[in-house]
Image: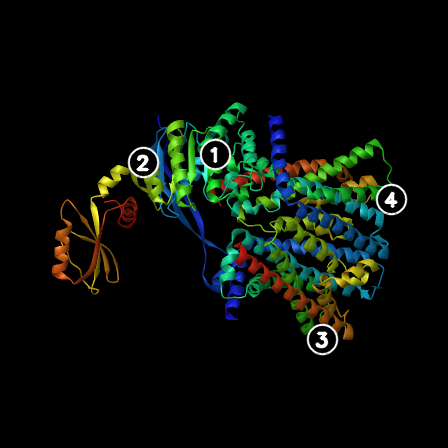
Amino acid sequence: MVRRYFKLYFLLAGAYVRSRLQYRLSFGLMCFGIVISEICLLGLLGALLAKFRTVNGWTWAEVVFLYGLGNLAYSFMRILGSQLDDFDRYIVRGELDSVLIRPVPPLFYILASRIELIHVSRALTSVVIFVVAFHLSGIRWTLGVALFTFTTILSGTLIMFTLMLISATVALWTTKSGKLTDLLISATKEATAFPISIYPLAVRLLLTFILPVAFVTYYPAQQLLQKGEFLGMPELFQFGAPVVALVMLCVSYLFWCSGLRRYHSTGS
Amino acid sequence: MKKYLTFTVKAFQRTLTYRFELWMELFINVLFMLVYVYLWKALYTGRTSVEGYDLNRILTYIVVSQTLLTFTFTLRITRIIEEKVRTGEVVTDLMKPIDFQLMTLATAAGTSSHTALFNMLPKFLLFYGVFGLSLPSSLLMVFLFIISVVLGYVILFSIEFIIGIFAFWVVEIRGLYAFVIWGLAMLFSGYFLPMEFYPTFLAKIAAVLPFRAIIYFPTAIYTGQLIGERLVTALLIQLTWVAALVGFGRLAYRAAFRKLVIQGG
Amino acid sequence: MPIITVEHLSKHFKVHKRRTGFWGNLSSTISRKHDIIKAVDDVNFSLERGELVGYIGANGAGKSTTIKMLTGILVPTSGHIDVMGLTPYRHRKENTRRIGVVFGQRTQLWWDLPVIDSFELLKHIYEIPQNLYKQNLEFFSEMLQLQPFLSTPVRRLSLGQRMRCDLTAALLHNPEILYLDEPTIGLDVVAKEQVRQFLRQVNAERQVTVILTTHDLNDVEKVCQRLIIIDSGKIIYDGGIDALKKRYGKTRMLIVDLAQAYSDIQLDGVDLTRRDGNRIWLAFDRDTISASEVIAQLTARYEIQDLTISEPEIEEIVRRIYEIGVY
């Protein structure tokens, strides 16, 4: 059973990759565009930090560390969950009907139909940025640190993915979500690139409890960088990412199911 | 002229129907702007002025530029043209006794005036009120700012239009679009920080590209960063880009039209 | 034992009322009202295995809604559906394994990949055993002459070729029921004929039950044995095509161009069914009155410029059923 789904995932995702590779030039340009924009954005961020030295007591290496961590989670999520960012076309063009006549769980089918390799270029850039920042922030590699980092990135990817799923599911009610999902994810990603201590309480609460992306970067970074800035939140939050990811996974899946139920009863 | 205005009104009304999308978009935009406003507030703690920007001016800059950036998110001209080419709808458009470029611009203007009225204006006013931002120094500056915004808008439109026209020759233009709009335009338009803060080499690249004319020029006029001779130069640069890009767009779509007539699509 | 049983099936939708005009539009942004639309309203029918049924109706009559409920995409508001012992929306996955679906307006194939790749993918999605897959692929590619373009990307196929591939894709897993939603839409005459021929053959040789929605009545006339007509969500005819012709086919139509638009037209034994300027359509039953009698009446009372008599085609019959209901 599990094997069948693994195989099916690779076959469907492979079909998408082969489709995209028909347009090599476009594919190459997109990768190139992403790398360029990542590097330039880092250049701008660097220019800014070079001028101001610190952000709320965070050195520029530490800020780049946060930025890299968020970006990594973001790129992995983009590779695996890109199908959700223009999910509304499934409803607008009636493609969801075509999914529902397959003997496969709809969400699985939708996610498997697209694995966006252009974001591998972003992931690779992020890895480089992250590793360098990791080093410059003076963290030493141990097995524990490596494991913690891995779990953090995995949980971060899942948290961002679930936000994307929730945002996409909204289209099952509104029919059209346009660039909303994309916007939401970019906004939250941007928000996690900086220490959340710069924001007022309301925004911090929003980023902790409602769009819990503070668990993608800020709280785990407390553990890795040993900053001890919990802003009145429990210190346990530094280990909270996997729990938050699991909770969000359940919440978003239930939301998806109820969205699908709604679609089953309205068909639009 | 009136027939083009019809396209504007129709696009405006079409956009009105997506209620939820509007509220959410506004909410997310506000979040985006909050991130940058607070980042700059944090950066300016203990400082009075950097590169000629005091805190008030930099916040004004960030809010105005983020507001103008909304056009980039909502325009979608490339996607519309690509879809029309793919479905063949473009043929009927080209057969109509109207100018395709003007018609597209009129449609875009409809969508965008909606964006301006229901998204950009409210969020600008919100930030203006909450953070006590400044207004342009005089009515003349307000006027020049608006002119500059319109010119910048036409430049953004023309770039998207030209990419869209490429769809006549290549099936897949998403790559080009992503590269130009999300790659180049985002970086060199000055939405993230004013040109004055750019490292020299990036500033040099930005100076030869049209993107800073979309956001940086109008915003710098608003904040009073560009005055006198430099302001006039900025407007002239914008005008030159408008002429060049609109002209190139025309040539491109004429060529596309010829191709369509000769090869039948 | 019927393969499909539908009892008292209804589907109601809430539809947002769109206010007109600028201010109406603006106020819609803030609050909305809605109406209830009965897309399918107390529909009953059952199908035996191996039947070939045309399900027809105007746009918005409820055809697609019915198909969507049968395939498990939509949940009925009320009523009961039994497809091969399953309730489609409750047993969606089991149901989909045993049915094939073709949407005429959009392909189920992978747009940028060679046709054969789509078939391969479907083999895995439906877990079709390799030998069955090979056998079916051979069977269909011979029958539909797919060989020349099996390795062509779908986007380069003509509409007709694509439809042939879509039909194959829907049948590779040996479904017992095949649902077709407007399979001939946009096809040229030759391609339409190919599709029809294929459907008859598949139905005859493989005992596949076929339900076909269309608004091209030639499809129905040339393919189906049975016809279900739906209008405003209600079934208004269910029966054989021959029976339909026999029952309504006695009515003939006389189309007359009058010299002037008479305000009041009175004829015995004749129905004035339509009127367009000086042209009138007269329906009469050939068992009770002959064409010459009608013409004699006409010429005696009015001045005529031209006239033609038409034998009822299925198209005409259905149009009349729509216009004046079952009689």
Under mark 2, the amino acid is: Arg
Residue C168 — which label? Answer: 1
Distance between mark 3 and mark 2 Cα atoms: 79 Å
From this view, report whether residue B196 is shown above or below residue C118: below
From this view, report whether residue C97 is shown above or below residue A21: above
* Chain containing the residue with disc 4: A
- Mark 3, Cα crowd under 10 Å, few <14 / some 14-19 / many 20+, is few
Residue B138 — which label? Answer: 3
Q: Which colour scheme is used?
A: rainbow
Q: Do the residues labelled 3 and 4 touch (CB within 8 Å)?
A: no
Q: Do labels 4 and 1 share a chain?
A: no
Residue at 46 percent across and 36 percent down: it is C167
Element at label 4: helix
* Chain containing the residue with disc 3: B
Element at label 2: strand
> Residue B252 at x, y = what percent?
62, 61
* Chain containing the residue with disc 1: C
